[in-house]
Image (spheres, helix red, strand yellow):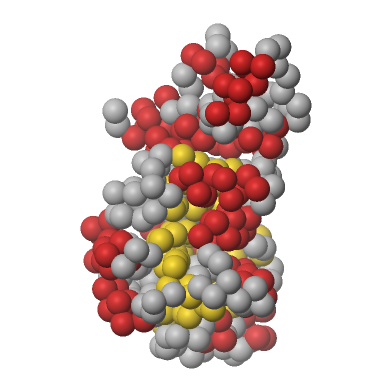
Amino acid sequence: MKQNTRLIQAGRGKQWIGQAVNPPVVRASTITFDTMAELAHASQHKGERVPYYGRRGTSTHFAFQEAICELEGGAGCALYPCGAAAVSGSLLAFLQQGDHLLMVDSVYEPTRALCEKVLRPMGVETQYYDPMLGADIERLIRPNTKVIFLESPGSITMEVQDVPAICRIARANGIVTILDNTWASPILCRPFALGVDVSIQAATKYIVGHSDVMLGTASANASHWPQLREHSYLLGYCASADDVYQASRGLRTLGVRLAQHQQNALQVAEWLAQRPEVETVRHPAFASTPGHAFFQRDFAGSNGLFSFVLKQGGAKAVAAFVEGMQYFKMGFSWGGYESLISPTLNVQKLRTASEWPYQGPLIRLHIGLEDPADLIADLELAFQRYQASL
Ligand SMILES: *Cc1c(COP(=O)(O)O)cnc(C)c1O
């Protein structure tokens, strides 16, 4: 089955959809049973594809979980109220007091804050590592290292990691690997084929695709699924059937949306790379981005999210650039149909284990489904405002 066909088929078995096209929204806290035998059967299945209690999900959830497993290649999938909860739920499932966590230095900033403000006071020590470290990560492993966390490409700066090399070292040392796979969505890379144990999606982004629902997923391979499932359940993570329905719906158009995001973003990124004001473009499909060769090896394509670095300018010049855009809105998150712009004045401040090689400010773009000619015209005016403010 080819990928666009799988996106249509996944999680749409007769047992989930009946005679409709989409799975119905089944909202439930209590699930009721007629006999002791039915109750025992449900409890044995731990809520996997058999209703047990609302927190374990209903058929709406089971259909979506099945679809994510099929797309990412995992053995099971836990659902969370947002991507950040999928990150905390995955880390808390495999870490205890006294453990050592290796965390990629280019990680999504709230994940770093979780390590410092929640995990460290609980007695879990986080050590950050250079995103380009690869197999040399072996040097950092200690007897109490329990988890290596990866995010590829990195948030904002887009370094692509050598995921298979790190996973090989981790597995040889009995260490769990957790990959924040949000940039790739479930279709641009196959995390379990690369060797990861747990793959996280902020479904909020491309899976939902319309900037109106928060949802997270974490899938695991067969050996790590029981622990991830049980710990996430005990911590009380769950998601509403209505939100999961929207995410299921988003999957059906994910392939065509991403193809268009990719095409539009490449056009804008190529235009930016020619601008004299631009120091570099950080886009995994560009040779200027560290780990580009790993991107070519491990990914099936790119999406709408990338960054570029300006040669110069402080807060005033950056404000002149990002304020007054016609189509790009300023705000967090990404993955919807609309274009977004987000400035970072000091990238080095966000990292502790690697050197950021540029002085100028960074601007991250999410390229939406507008016509790229309009987006380029919008950016052209931004460069004029920026030039005038220098
Ligand atoms: C957005 C994002 C998250 C958090 O997802 P939310 O649904 O906003 O909580 C986690 N990781 C990455 C890489 C993200 O981009």
Splitting the image into 4 quarters, where does residue 73 fall? top left
Q: Residue at x 38, y 43 (%)?
A: 222
Q: Which of 256 and 376 is in front in this view?
A: 256
Which residue is located at x 71 percent, y 11 percent? 34
Q: In this view, does 337 lie to the left or right of 128?
A: right
**Rendered image quadrant of residue 58:** top right
Residue 248's x, y, as percent?
Answer: 55, 33
Residue at image location 72% in from the left, 23% down from the top: 31
- Can residue 143 be spotted in the picture? yes
x, y (%) of residue 265?
43, 57
Residue 8, above or below 214? above
- Viewport quadrant of the N terminus: top left
Residue 144, percent across and down?
44, 75
From this viewpoint, which residue is outermost toward the front? 36
Image-based side of 240 in relation to 125, left or right: right
Given residues 192 and 371, the one toward you in this image is 192
Residue that extends furthest to the right in the rendered view of this protein: 30
Residue 89 x/y as whole percent: 59, 55
Residue placed most toward the observer, 285 or 349? 349
Q: In which quarter of the image is the C terminus?
A: bottom right
Which of the two residues, 52 or 106, is positioned nearer the viewer here?
A: 52
Residue at the spot x=60%, y=49% of the render? 232
On the question of residue 362 being in view, the answer is no
**Number of marks in picture:** 0
32 is higher (above) or lower (below) than 85: above
Eyeballing the image, is 110 above or below 246? below
Residue 344, by quadrant, is bottom right
Above or below 88: residue 145: below
